[in-house]
Image (cartoon, grey):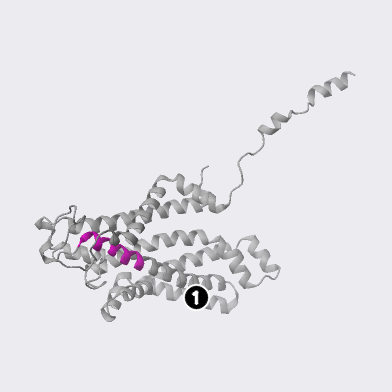
Amino acid sequence: MLEKASQDTLFRQLQKDRLRKDEIKRPSVSQAKESIRRVIKNKLALTGTILLLFILFFALFGPKMVPYSYSDQSLANGNLAPGGKHWFGTDDLGRDMWARTWYGARISLTIGVAAALIDLVIGLLVGGISGYMAGRGKFGDRVDSLLMRLVEILYSIPYLLVVILLLVVMKPGLWTIIIALSITGWVSMARVVRGQILQIKQQEFVAAAQKLGTSHRTIILKHLFPNMLGIIIVNLTFTIPQAIFAEAFLSFIGLGVQAPIASWGTMANDALGVILSGQWWRLFFPGLLISLTMFAFNVFGDGLQDALDPHQTKD
């Protein structure tokens, strides 16, 4: 009897309410929803997202908010300060700066996104082939070595020098700038993709898939690509502002889009000669939007990098 009583004191049945307290009450969420939650929780990343949406909205609808087009001229209304009739003022030809500023946003964003997407496609192909063929016999090593030597040669040449030389030879225009920016812009993406594939190839699940006879197509699409998607997206968010700034610089020095097309770089170039005469608005608004766009993309990219990297999460 004493032995049974001692066992009863040592082993007691837990109450149901105590068991409920130990239950995990947080519902399971997908990786995409968790990444969105982390971006929203990051104040800088959220600020960058709001700024990008703001710029995109006015780039699409801003020119339609005024009864002037970006190319309408009125010499009688030249160099008017910002006011009720012309919200951002006018330039020396009487063109409305509001319409030109937001039309220039369309041009800059179009060039930035198009050049970044072309860089992404070429970088994925070159980096993917190089990384996947590495270590697959003599032929695979030769392919990897050949592609990487090409990447190193292009990487050693100054980026803007190549772009400027191409723009001097080719006819200036929107697609000319996009092609020129994409000639060497894919090099960084290719190096990132190759490094990611070489790292993921060493993982056990890839080795297991290869031992089971899984096709190369399935390994690439089901195992390699999804696991490097995060770093690719982050790299893309940093490539877009680089292309936008490069376009603004090229337009500023006269190698970008040509008149009468408006661009932030051409507007800054037109305003440079009159900035000391008191016409501050002509340089202020395009310069401000270039700065805001650079800031928004960079903080959004930093926040996205933290959100997609599970090793950097603290909660």
User: Going by the picture, which residue comes out furthest to the front?
Assistant: 67
Q: Is residue 311 magenta?
A: no
Q: Measured from the top left, where is residue 275 in percent x and y?
A: 13, 58
Q: Measured from the top left, where is residue 292 in percent x and y?
A: 31, 54
Residue 54 visible: yes
Instruction: Say what amino acid the circle numbered 1 marks.
Output: Ser
What secondary structure is the stretch in magenta mostly built from? helix
| Image point (41%, 72%), residue name | 152
The magenta segment is: 96-111
Say which residue label 1 marks.
145
Q: Nearer the viewer, residue 37 or 124?
A: 37
| Image point (47%, 64%), residue name | 192
> Looking at the rendering, which quadrant does residue 187 occupy?
bottom left
User: Going by the picture, which residue comes out furthest to the top?
Assistant: 2
**Could you classify mark 1 by the number of other residues whose Cα lies within 10 Å: few (under 14), some (14-19), or many (20 or more)?**
some
> Looking at the rendering, which quadrant does residue 277 occupy?
bottom left
Q: Is residue 104 magenta?
A: yes
> Looking at the rendering, which quadrant does residue 60 occupy?
bottom left
